[in-house]
Amino acid sequence: MTVAIEMGHTTAGAPAALDLEELLATRLLVQGNSGSGKSHLLRRLLEQSAPWVQQTIIDPEGDFVSLGDRFGHLVINAEEHTERGLQSAGERARIHRVSTVLNLEGLDAENQMRRAAAFLGGLFEVARDHWYPMLVVVDEAQLFAPAVAGEVSDEARKLSLGAMTNLMCRGRKRGLAGIIATQRLAKLAKNVAAEASNFLMGRTFLDIDMARAADLLGMERRQAEAFRDLERGQFMALGPALSRRPLGLRIGPTDTSPRNGTPRLMPLPESALEDARAIILAAPPPETVRPQRRSSPDLLDQLMAAKSAALEIRPEPVEPPISAEDLAERRERVDRVLRAVLAQPDAGFRVIGVLYQEFVVRCRIEGLASVVPDLPAFRRMLTRARAGLGSDTAGDDAWQDVSVRASLLPEDMQGVFMMIARAAKEGWPCPSDAAIARAYGSHSLRRARRLLTYIEEQGLIVCQLDGLGRRVVTLVELAWATAPGDPNAEEAEQGSLAV
């Protein structure tokens, strides 16, 4: 299915469409001097594509935080988090497929670069299982991928430039589609700009920027003067997702607006300020000096590194063979450990890596180190456990059919499907939106409803409401059906289905 995003109209009046699937594979570069409508273009693209693809915006000025109210983006104020915290946030955003806005407003240039690099690193380094398609929009990209060294430290510049290079050069295979916007092409690192295959060039006045824009669009140098004549919101487009030949277009309206609009002229106060000199030149307030907080060493990482080094030089012990009865008994104990991990109040909302670490530690405490599963096997166990299933159902033919059907869904949705299947098989009430959201690792009831809609669109279930507004879910082909359940019920009423 081709998804066409309407960006506005061409100069001839025809609709100007952007192929979203092609954009995900080829990346986009937007250039325009201040006041050319560059941010308006990005806002239009984000609004039109929000229902179709996960997004994240690196926002140095806080222009895009209003997307959170209208489209549900999670706004992350970078100054409130450490670099390590932002890297974890990037990983979790990809794992749980949450659209985000990284608001860098209020930070100096060096800290903006460091925190943006950490967040982009989290998006980039996530496990292969979570390489879902994602638009990554970087506004004022010349700040994060500068062509020459500036006033920031070399370390910050290398971190930021490396993250931007990974996004544009290696991000495609990981599902990351970079969209970078800049006021000055001449200030943007060439290896970052060169990876884009789609271009939207707005009003530009400096000769060096007009020449580079003309080169990217395949125009002759004498035609570069045309960029000076473009109006606000008017761009020249070229690329496989836009047009095979340079095409003029005008960006359409947006539903949201930046917090700070364009400054407009307004009359000065009619009455003069009394005692202006005393007010303006009054002594400044005393400065408050905050003590610098030292970053504490990560003891867990140090312990893990020390243990790995010890294992490399220590010969691996040879364990005696385990009988089938002992192995079954140990697996039952492993199941109990997993249930204990999931019984914690916040377990449904923690990332799999953190849950796995705690699971491994608990297994070692119980003397079960020899049967601890690896991370992929733990993911499968977690999916079944969240559906309320143990290892004893592995040989059940009916559940084998359920597992086969669940494999048609993305991994993070399989637990939800199996939880519903269990309720249907046992004749229990349909899980509420809150129980479904928890099984998915989310607090959003709207996301839970979208999950059910998606699973139904895949032809795996049929959802119906009875006369009292209670939901009934039937599994296609298996003909299992849940009892009527209130979608708006509190999670506590059906919490046992989600764990």
Image: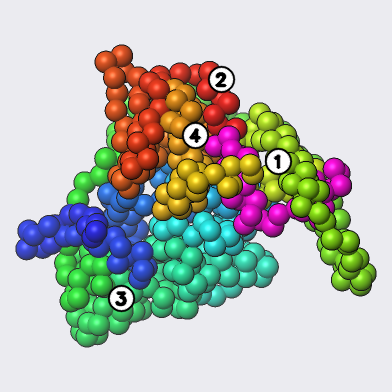
Where disc 3 sits, the SS reads: helix
Give the CA separation, mark 4 to mark 1.
18 Å
Q: Amino acid at mark 2?
A: Ala
Q: Magenta stretch: give its range.
A: 363-390
Give the CA separation, mark 4 to mark 3.
58 Å
Give the CA separation, mark 1 to mark 3.
60 Å
Residue ID for mark 2: 492
User: For the stretch drawn in magenta, what is the main secondary structure?
Assistant: helix
- 8 relative to 187, above or below: above
Q: Amino acid at mark 3?
A: Ala
Give the percent coordinates (x, y) of residue 226. Answer: 19, 73
Question: Residue drawn 33% across and 41% down?
Answer: 476
Q: Amino acid at mark 4?
A: Arg
Residue ID for mark 1: 335
Residue ID for mark 4: 422
Residue ID for mark 3: 213
Mark 4 or mark 3: which is in front? 4
Mark 1 or mark 3: which is in front? 1
Q: Residue furthest top?
A: 468
- 12 relative to 266, above or below: below
Mark toward the start of the polypeptide (1 vs 3)? 3
Where disc 4 sits, the SS reads: helix
Mark toward the start of the polypeptide (4 vs 3)? 3
Where disc 1 sits, the SS reads: helix
Mark toward the start of the polypeptide (3 vs 2)? 3
Quadrant for the C terminus in the image: top right
Question: Residue drawn 41% across and 63% down?
Answer: 177
